[in-house]
Image: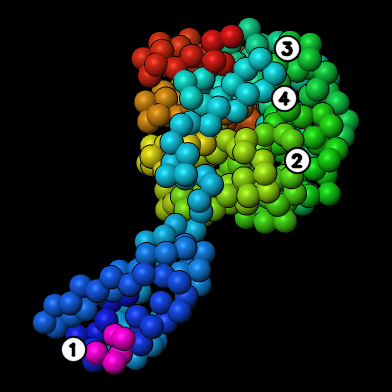
């Protein structure tokens, strides 16, 4: 932290700040110019962060260079976290492709799509049983019946399954059926839920909020890690901007930036970012080039009749084409689909 004193601050004002820092157990390092004094502060982050110097006599500005997160940062852990689920992995050279419909609609739909995405090379199966819908009149998902279909379809084709926990009250039942618990964009800052998932033994797929900053996403992940659950995958799924051509704007800077800031795996979801199927291939390729550790792609056997997110869903053959184009790009980045097992 830096405390920047006003021009010509008196030595009593400077000393007062130094005394407060010393009392708090921190070290104060003074850079004194003719006009300005800047006090560099070193000490326990937790303690220093709580000190309120703004508004003290002679203080112009306080710059907190400390980050509001710790466990998720690369400074804390240099080597990448690899999230392993059954015989597949995401992170640290393992590239994951999570594919499946937006929502689970029927046994036939779920089994069809599971077989198709497995054949095309997906490493995990997705499907929503509890759906966060903007309108309360839209299809809300099949609930526990849907979870059972997802599990059965995943087991048949040998893919781990990912599904969303919409409410902290459903966390336990979702964990009974799912291998990875997804926290949706609208729940990214549901701190009670993040606390609860932090105590569970299932990896968490944390999607970036529609208007959340990178720092807010990392701080949300910190809640889960602080609870003891170190297996978190971050997902860039597009953010709200002024652009209307796409549903959201895929923030590739966030993918590349997160890879600098955190050891956690980072995946991209071009489906919810674009909201249109004709952009899934280029955005998937771009995500791989930006350093993503994986992708989440919506696939539906009959997108025109999908109960949710049809316009952005790929048909199984279109998904296979995307996967074929991705393979050499994943290899070029030195990564292996599913970790190579
Ligand atoms: C989803 O993955 O189906 C979903 C609802 O995503 P998001 O929370 O990113 O909107
Ligand atoms: Mn969806």
The circle on residue 161 is 4
Q: Is residue 315 visible?
A: no
- Is there a contact, CB below 8 Å, between mark 4 and mark 3? no
The spot of residue 81 in percent (x, y) is 53, 31
Circle 2 residues within 10 Å: few <14, some 14–19, many ≥20:
some
Residue closest to the eye, 127 or 2: 2
The span shown in magenta is 11-15
Residue closest to the eye, 179 or 47: 47
The spot of residue 133 in percent (x, y) is 71, 46
Q: Is residue 166 above or below residue 341?
A: below
**Residue plotted at (51% across, 21% down):** 95
Q: Nearer the viewer, mark 3 or mark 1?
A: 1
Circle 1 residues within 10 Å: few <14, some 14–19, many ≥20:
few
**Mark closer to the chain start, 4 or 1:** 1
Q: Does dot 2 land on a helix, a strand or a loop?
A: loop
Check if residue 221 falls in the magenta segment: no
Circle 3 residue: 158
Q: Does dot 1 land on a helix, a strand or a loop?
A: loop
**Residue plotted at (37% across, 61% down):** 65
**Residue plotted at (58% across, 49% down):** 222
- Label 4, label 3: how many angstroms apart (C-alpha)? 9 Å
Check if residue 12 falls in the magenta segment: yes
The circle on residue 200 is 2
**Mark closer to the chain start, 3 or 1:** 1
Circle 1 residue: 8
**Mark closer to the chain start, 2 or 1:** 1
**Mark closer to the chain start, 4 or 2:** 4
**Mark closer to the chain start, 2 or 3:** 3
- Label 4, label 1: how many angstroms apart (C-alpha)? 63 Å
Q: Does dot 3 land on a helix, a strand or a loop?
A: loop
């Amino acid at each position: 932290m830096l405390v920047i004193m006003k021009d010509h601050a008196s030595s009593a004002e400077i000393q007062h700040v130094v005394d407060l820092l010393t009392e708090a157990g921190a070290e104060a390092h003074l850079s004194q110019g003719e006009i300005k004094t800047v006090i560099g502060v070193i000490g326990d982050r937790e303690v220093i962060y709580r000190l309120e110097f703004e508004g003290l006599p002679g203080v112009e500005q306080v710059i907190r260079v400390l980050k509001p997160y710790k466990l998720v940062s690369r400074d804390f852990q240099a080597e990448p976290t690899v999230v392993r689920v059954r015989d597949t992995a995401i992170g640290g050279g393992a590239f994951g492709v999570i594919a499946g419909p937006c929502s689970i609609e029927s046994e036939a739909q779920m089994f069809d799509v599971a077989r198709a995405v497995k054949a095309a090379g997906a490493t995990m199966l997705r499907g929503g049983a509890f759906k966060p819908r903007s309108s309360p009149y839209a299809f809300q998902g099949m609930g526990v019946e849907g979870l059972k279909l997802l599990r059965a379809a995943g087991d048949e084709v040998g893919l781990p399954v990912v599904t969303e926990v919409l409410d902290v009250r459903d966390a336990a039942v979702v964990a009974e059926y799912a291998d990875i618990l997804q926290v949706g964009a609208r729940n990214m800052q549901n701190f009670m839920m993040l606390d609860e998932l932090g105590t569970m033994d299932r990896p968490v797929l944390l999607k970036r909020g529609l208007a959340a900053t990178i720092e807010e996403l990392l701080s949300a992940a910190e809640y889960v890690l602080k609870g003891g659950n170190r297996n978190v995958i971050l997902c860039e799924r597009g953010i709200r901007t002024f652009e209307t051509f796409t549903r959201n704007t895929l923030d590739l800077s966030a993918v590349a930036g997160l890879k600098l800031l955190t050891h956690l795996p980072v995946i991209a979801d071009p489906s919810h970012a674009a909201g249109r199927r004709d952009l899934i291939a280029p955005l998937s390729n771009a995500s791989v080039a930006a350093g993503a550790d994986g992708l989440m792609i919506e696939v539906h056997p009959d997108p025109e009749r999908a109960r949710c997110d049809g316009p952005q869903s790929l048909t199984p053959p279109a998904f296979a084409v995307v996967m074929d184009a991705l393979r050499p790009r994943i290899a070029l980045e030195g990564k292996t689909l599913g970790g190579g097992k």
